[in-house]
Amino acid sequence: MTEEMVPVDPDSKITFDCSSQNECFNECCRDLNQALTPYDVLRLKNNLGLSSQKFLRTCTSLHHGPTSGLPVVEFKPNPDAGYECPFVTKKGCSVYPDRPASCRMYPLARAIARSRETGQIVEYFALIEEPHCKGFGKKNGQTVRDWLKDQDVDMHNAQNDKLMELISLKNRIMPGKLEGALADKFYLALYDIDEFREQIMNKNLLKGLEIPKSVFDALKADKALLNFGLSWVKKELFGIEMVFKG
Ligand code: SF4
Ligand code: SF4
């Protein structure tokens, strides 16, 4: 499959429409090779009413990056349907409100960098033009910014950017392969968050850490727990002290 990447900015006009009327409907949900971020997992497992453990075991496969050792969680393809996403149906995506960031963004690709001058995150976008996708040339008058708003992807991007910063920190401080207990902690705190909560609440995982009650109580909510997990991983991997605002 050949593809073309065309750089665009937020105010660039794009002529694109993804609709069930397109002859390619659902094509992009087949032939999957899709990594899921921790926030993708959080949204999907809640959509399905599953614990993170059950979701990860049933719907995903896990391997580790050969150089980084970081966990890579991917959709487990439906064995009866080649590499099709387990959530694609004839009517479209069965988890649409909680579909992953990469599904929301397609056919846009997004990269980020932190500005040295301002410290702010700067976003870069490109259109991925693949022959199987027939949505191009179908809708006038929208910008990249409009598309992103329609896809309701801001929260996913904000959470995924925190993961990217953690990974780039790891690459700077600990460039080798993450293995053993450290790799397990990364997976536990960021992907298997219901088990992480269980170990915090009932198995004294945070023994020795003085956590204000308000922070501890807030860990009942998944997003707060995920953000806590990002800080905890930085402490466990790099010795960066956790700061609590009680
Ligand atoms: S999660 Fe939904 S949109 Fe994403 S690949 Fe699966 S079926 Fe398609
Ligand atoms: S291939 Fe493109 S236009 Fe067709 S359903 Fe997927 S994203 Fe939409």
Image (tube, helix red, strand yellow):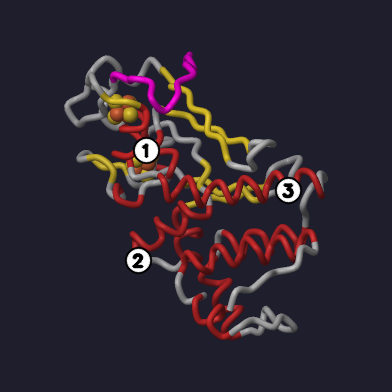
Q: Find residue 92 and report its image quarter.
A: top left
Question: Could you give the CA–CA distance between mark 3 and mark 2, rounded to whole angstroms?
Answer: 33 Å
Which is more toward the observer, 159 or 82? 159
> What's the residue type where badge 3 is placed?
Leu
Callout 3–callout 2 Cβ contact below 8 Å: no
Q: Is residue 217 above or below residue 93?
A: below
**Ligand 2 quadrant?**
top left
Q: Is residue 58 above or below residue 15?
A: below
Q: Find residue 103 and report its image quarter.
A: top left
Q: Which residues are magenta?
A: 1-15
Of callouts 1 and 2, which one flags the residue occurring earlier in the amino acid sequence?
Answer: 2
Callout 1–callout 2 Cβ contact below 8 Å: no
Query: Dot 2, how many residues are within 10 Å of its Cα: few (below 14), some (14-19), or many (20+)?
Result: few
- Locate residue 167, reporting x and y percent: 68, 47
Query: Dot 1, how many residues are within 10 Å of its Cα: few (below 14), some (14-19), or many (20+)?
Result: few
Q: Is residue 82 above or below residue 171?
A: above
Farthest residue, direction front? 117
- Locate residue 78, reporting x and y percent: 40, 44
Residue 17 falls inside the magenta stretch: no
Count numbered badges in the picture.
3
Give the secondary structure at mark 2.
loop
Question: What residue is pinned by disc 2?
Answer: 49
Residue 12 falls inside the magenta stretch: yes
Give the secondary structure at mark 3.
helix
Q: Quadrant of the C terminus?
A: bottom right
Question: What residue is pinned by disc 3?
Answer: 169
Left or right of 2? Residue 112 is right
Of callouts 3 and 2, which one flags the residue occurring earlier in the amino acid sequence?
Answer: 2
Question: What residue is pinned by disc 1?
Answer: 81
